[in-house]
Image (cartoon, rainbow, N blue to C red):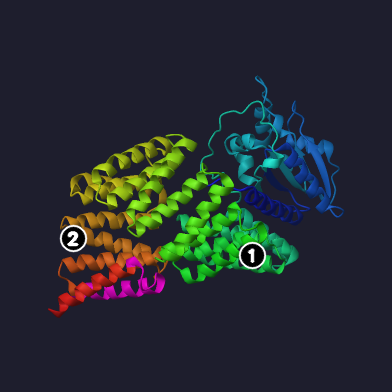
């Protein structure tokens, strides 16, 4: 993952600020607990001052400071706030708790929070509790009851210009089970805030634009990551909310947030294979970013990469190449030749060359990216493992199996060590190594790896996920290669059904699944069963990928072979 640029951090914080402001205003007169997470002291003070100014004069803001000797949230509010209407409490002072060697103030604080639900019910006001990330990471474990009924979490990323020296003591980070710290909001929280905001200001108010944007992005992420509980509905909501956000951002000239929503919608369309709808959005983002930030900016390079990736997905390699090259050149100029974003760009360009069969041009780029990651991130890092996989895959396509195998094995071992034995990246590494063994006819070695990869994906991602469908296809192809057609057919059928359900009937992956099943029938001599599948696959591929895409050509060639066979 590339580090966020300063502009991106500022944009994220502006959206978080706007969402918290809307939540505060919508919660006046009722108990609402909002957790604001911020590490930089100066940044926190600036945010509180900004909230105080924007809420005045209709809403009075009280600054409440916790007593480290008696760190009770309820007691501090009762002592420092004059209860009444149209008030909000901003609570600080937690950032120094538990820093001393024998300081038990943080444990006391968590203890008070855990048993404070009934005591806070009398406080009819929004309460914004400001925490550092050090404390927030422990909250769900140390005060689970309080954490479960809080109304919202708003994380502010540290802006480089506002960061002071780190605190003198940083304890070991404890993981929070079933919580993604990278996700600032959850669906229920945002839906609740949106409902309140619409009731108060209307659905076309400038105040609800940020909520539409965040909800749309969250639903889109759920769908694309396979985490959606109701895929069809969440897909509809993702598109609907993003379109509403874009309309309001356009109306109110939100030039900083509009490119983010456009990119999210374009990414959603691209995921669905709706490339023609995604392209003008990516082009608009590139144009806007160049206009806002100048032609030489890291965010411009990101936009170039996004558009190039779309062209590559369509097999439009000649259109993609100059954009990838331009992005790489920009990153090198702006960030220096040794930066993770440069390594990522090298990988992107190398993969494009590999897709075109330009292996000699791809290899030095993959090697350079691997070397950069190792130098910048250390010899054992997930990005290093990914680079090893990339280089191994290049050797695999060239038939250089003896060179590919140790790299695949090294990547698998590293991924297991860094991420644990049950992780999607481990499943991908198992698939890669199994594919190598299969190509060498080492079927007995390949099968347990494919099965293990499938099992990991089903356990982690659920029984219905695009990645699970890929594993089913892989295992089916192995069985087909061995002539075990009866074992292969139900797996191909299951993969096809799952892909249609998850990605829609008009998606390139559906065309691939149809082609796979048709190929099985062809090898069995079941030509009448194969023909309509090839026809359907070709039709989908031509519509979604274009007539000249390599995958379209493969399906067309397969269909042509079938027709020639029938003509004999």
Q: Residues within 10 Å of mark 1 (few under 14, many from 20)?
A: many
- Quadrant where the C terminus lies? bottom left
Could you tell whether 489 is left or right of 95 in the image?
left
Which image quadrant is residue 198 in?
bottom right
Q: Is residue 546 magenta?
A: yes
Task: Look at 22% across and 59% down and name the residue there.
Answer: 488
- What separation in Å lies between label 2 and label 1 (alpha carbons)? 50 Å
Task: Look at 30% across and 69% down and name the residue there.
Answer: 553
Mark toward the start of the polypeptide (2 vs 1): 1
Compared to residue 190, the image places residue 1 above or below, namely above
Looking at the picture, how far across and down is residue 418, in whole percent?
A: 42, 36
Q: Is residue 473 magenta?
A: no
Identify residue for label 2: 486
Could you tell whether 538 is left or right of 235 in the image?
left
Which residue occupies the foreground of this view, 218 or 255?
Answer: 255
Q: The residue tagged with tag 2: helix, strand or loop? A: helix
Q: Residue furthest bottom?
A: 567
Magenta span of residues:
528-551
Looking at the picture, how far across and down is residue 337, in whole percent?
A: 52, 44
């Amino acid at each position: 993952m590339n580090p966020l640029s300063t502009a991106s951090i500022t944009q994220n914080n502006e959206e978080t600020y706007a969402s918290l402001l809307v939540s505060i205003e919508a919660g006046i007169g009722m108990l609402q607990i909002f957790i604001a997470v911020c590490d930089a002291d100066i940044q926190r003070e600036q945010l509180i001052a900004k909230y105080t100014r924007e809420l005045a004069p209709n809403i009075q803001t009280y600054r409440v400071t916790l007593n480290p000797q008696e760190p009770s949230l309820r007691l501090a509010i009762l002592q420092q706030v004059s209860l009444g209407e149209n008030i909000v409490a901003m609570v600080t002072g937690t950032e120094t708790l538990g820093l001393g060697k024998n300081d038990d103030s943080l444990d006391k604080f968590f203890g008070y929070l855990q048993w404070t639900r009934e005591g806070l019910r009398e406080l009819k006001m929004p309460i914004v509790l400001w925490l550092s990330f050090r404390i927030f990471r422990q909250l769900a474990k140390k005060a689970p009851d309080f954490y479960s009924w809080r109304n919202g979490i708003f994380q502010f990323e540290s802006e480089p210009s506002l960061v002071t020296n780190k605190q003198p003591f940083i304890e070991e980070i404890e993981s929070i089970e079933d919580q993604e710290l990278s996700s600032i909001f959850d669906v229920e929280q945002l839906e609740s805030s949106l409902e309140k905001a619409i009731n108060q200001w209307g659905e076309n108010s400038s105040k609800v634009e940020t909520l539409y944007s965040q909800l749309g992005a969250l639903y889109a992420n759920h769908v694309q990551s396979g985490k959606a509980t109701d895929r069809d509905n969440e897909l509809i909501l993702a598109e609907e909310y993003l379109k509403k956000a874009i309309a309001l951002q356009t109306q109110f000239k939100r030039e900083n947030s509009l490119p983010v929503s456009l990119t999210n919608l374009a990414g959603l369309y691209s995921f669905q294979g709706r490339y023609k709808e995604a392209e003008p959005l990516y082009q608009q983002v590139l144009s806007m970013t160049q206009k806002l930030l100048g032609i030489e900016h890291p965010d411009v390079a990101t936009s170039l990469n996004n558009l190039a990736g779309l062209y590559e997905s369509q097999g439009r390699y000649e259109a993609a190449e100059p954009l990838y090259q331009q992005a790489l050149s920009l990153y090198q100029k702006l960030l220096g030749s040794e930066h993770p974003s440069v390594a990522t760009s090298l990988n992107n360009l190398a993969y494009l060359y590999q897709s075109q069969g330009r292996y000699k041009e791809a290899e030095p780029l993959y090697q350079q990216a691997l070397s950069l990651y190792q130098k910048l991130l250390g010899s054992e890092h997930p990005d290093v493992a990914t680079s090893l996989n990339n280089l191994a895959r290049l050797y695999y396509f060239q038939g250089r199996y003896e060179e590919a195998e140790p790299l695949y094995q090294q990547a698998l071992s590293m991924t297991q060590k860094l991420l644990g034995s049950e992780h999607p990246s481990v499943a991908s590494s198992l698939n890669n190594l199994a594919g190598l063994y299969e190509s060498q006819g080492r079927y007995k070695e390949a099968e347990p790896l494919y099965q293990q990869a499938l099992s990991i994906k089903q356990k982690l991602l659920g029984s219905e996920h695009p990645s699970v469908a890929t594993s089913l296809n892989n295992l089916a192809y192995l069985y087909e290669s061995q002539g075990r057609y009866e074992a292969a057919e139900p797996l191909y059928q299951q993969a096809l059904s799952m892909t249609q359900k998850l990605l829609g009937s008009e998606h390139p992956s559906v065309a691939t699944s149809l082609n796979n099943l048709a190929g099985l029938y062809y090898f069995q001599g079941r030509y009448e069963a194969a023909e309509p599948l090839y026809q359907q696959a070709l039709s989908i591929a031509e519509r979604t990928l274009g007539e000249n895409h390599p995958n379209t050509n493969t399906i067309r060639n397969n269909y042509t072979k079938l027709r020639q066979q029938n003509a004999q």
